[in-house]
Amino acid sequence: AFLRTWSLRSSQLTNTVPSEYTNYVDSDGDSILYYQKPGTSGLRKRVKVFEQEHYTENFVWATLQAQPEIKGSTLVLGGDGRYYGVECAQKVLKLSAAAGVKKIIVGQNAILSTPAASNLIRKHKAYGGILMTASHNPGGPDNDFGIKYNIANGGPAPESVTNEIFNITKTIQSYSIAQLPDLDLSKIGSYKHGELEVEVVDSVADYVDLLKSIFDFDLIKKFLSENPSFKFLFDGLSGVTGSYGQAIFLGELGLSKDSVQNAVPLPDFGGLHPDPNLTYAHDLVERVEKDDITFGAASDGDGDRNMIIGKGVFVTPSDSVAIIADWAHVIPYFKGGLKGLARSMPTSGAIDRVAQAKGVAGYEVPTGWKFFGNLMDAGKLSICGEESFGTGSDHIREKDGLWAIVAWLNIIAAANQEHKGWNIKDILQAHYSKYGRNFFSRYDYEEVESEGAQKMIEHLQKTFESLNGTQLKATTTDTTFTVKETGNFAYTDPIDGSVSKNQGLYVVFSDGSRIVVRLSGTGSAGATIRLYVEKYSTEASEYGQDAQVGLKPLIEVALQLSKLQQFTGRDKPTVIT
Ligand code: G6P
Ligand code: ZN
């Protein structure tokens, strides 16, 4: 097919960096497109930004050019079904054809959940993949879109690659695109699109096979059919996992239709905020309480996050990963034992205790799933998780929402063989009795003015040195904490030796409690401050307590210490998890 080359830059334009990370327009009204900085999870912007002339092409072209062996390669392409996904996919196909990509494996209708895409990259030994998603950000014409590149191991591109993409977006002079008609992506099959081979695959089938190879589906099915009073409800939040959830829970496990809700993926997620937490998944939370649901679960827009709840009980992600690790022996995939366990720094230390008990290494990495990938590739890590509702294992290189949900079903089914009637609450209580309880909570202050947030961090850094050994008092509960250690988390990757600094401020108290403060790396407007508190208890009488009650004094001290209200003007968090 014939190529058209767009020239992007006239010589008189200077290469100054705009203050906003968006496309900007020069004085003559020409778009210049050289400042597209992908974050940890790709380039995320408003749909309107992506819809500007050349904007999407520029970024995709830069992404392709940043891969040294793109010519003759095979890529995977798919997204979470959000608005603009199909248009973007058509552009990616034509740009890839022009860049000399040999083959693209694309999900039907351009749909693939993030875990399913990671799986396909690995399964087909593809060179990489382009994922069209803005994860849990709202979708639709007035909301967000995103493009993210994953490498051959199936995981998000490391910073070296995203930096290279960014550099190219700043210096790119032109891009080429194949002049082809749009390809019909609704029909499964193999096509020739110019010089490019395109294979349209079922979005769901390979992923369902993967989960079936990991978990004991027969045991789960048997448990569900023998225990009709065990009521299960999955909420797809109108994100991509709706189709996967239907295939797994209705198709494979034979549950009734009312076991899933919001399970049809919609381009605008039905106006919902597709983030599985107690605030945004409130429909699910309400139905679980009202309809006496034993087990409720949700996943986010692109399917990598998860939340597990029961009637009157919420499983914090920090506990969830610790419990899955503790029960790993009932999951066929882990029959050979665990290679190692890991968590991100702000995540509670519950999983550390499991690692210790099992005699395997427990790693603490910075926030961001990519840090787990190196450990997995080196054969040192089996199960890991983050407090931000991400749980997963080395079966792929992304966190995996449905994996976590089915893991819990597998565990409950196995637990019931010995302890008839056990549900989520019993499993949690048994875990606390064995290991003690790590109370954990996170307060989010979203879209805070960047300057105030920055000042607060500077204030904390400055006061840190003088804090050691001092006592801080929560007046409302008359609790005193003695500061044992303060610091700014830094990580040296044990595999490649790379160093990541400034990954979060922490204060550890003499009783082992901890406060962590960091700025989110994923927000799209202003700054988001995250405040994490953790307290460890071996008092059996406290195990049944509401986390917010037990953690109240720590929160008070954290707010005192950070002067958060003073710096940001906020007296309440946007979200508490
Ligand atoms: C994404 C990443 C996670 C990370 C999360 C929170 O979902 O994939 O690995 O934990 O963002 O990041 P943030 O910087 O917003 O706390
Ligand atoms: Zn996500």
Image (cartoon, rainbow, N blue to C red):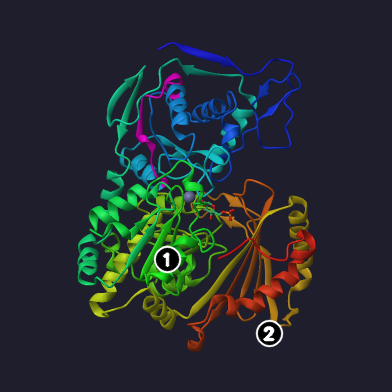
Residue 343 located within the stretch drawn in magenta: no
Task: Say what secondary structure mark 1 lies in.
Answer: helix
Residue 467 to residue 240: above or below: below
Identify which residue is drawn at 23% across, 69% down. Answer: 223
Q: Are marks 2 and 1 in contact (CB under 8 Å)?
A: no
Numbered mark located on residue 287 in the image: 1
Distance from Cα at disc 2 to Cα at disc 1: 34 Å
The vertical placement of 350 against 261, above or below, is below
- Amino acid residing under circle 2: Thr
Left or right: 442 as drawn, with respect to 150: right
Q: Position of residue 550 (x, y in %)?
A: 58, 80
Evaluate whether residue 393 shows in this view: no
Going by the numbered disc 1, the residue's amino acid type is Arg
Tell me residue 246's x, y (percent): 31, 52
Graded by Cα atoms within 10 Å as few (under 14), some (14 to 19) or many (20 or more), the crowding at tag 2 reads few
Q: Is residue 415 visible?
A: yes
Q: Nearer the viewer, residue 304 or 574?
A: 574
Tell me if mark 1 has few (under 14), some (14-19) or many (20+) residues whose alpha carbon lies within 10 angstroms of its own.
some
Residue found at the very far front of the displayed protein: 290
What is the secondary structure assignment of the residue under circle 2? loop
Q: Quadrant of residue 214?
A: bottom left
Q: Please state the horizontal and vertical placement of residue 482, each as a whole percent of the image.
A: 70, 80
Location of the N terminus by quadrant is: top left
In the figure, 557 relative to 526: above or below? below
User: Is the residue marked 2 within 8 Å of ligand 1, measured from its CB?
Assistant: no
Q: Position of residue 47 (x, y in %)?
A: 56, 36
- Residues 331 and 125: in front is 331
Which residue position is annotated with label 2? 477
Q: Quadrant of residue 311?
A: bottom left
- Number of the label disc, if any, that sits on residue 108: none
**What residue span does the magenta drawing correspond to?**
96-114
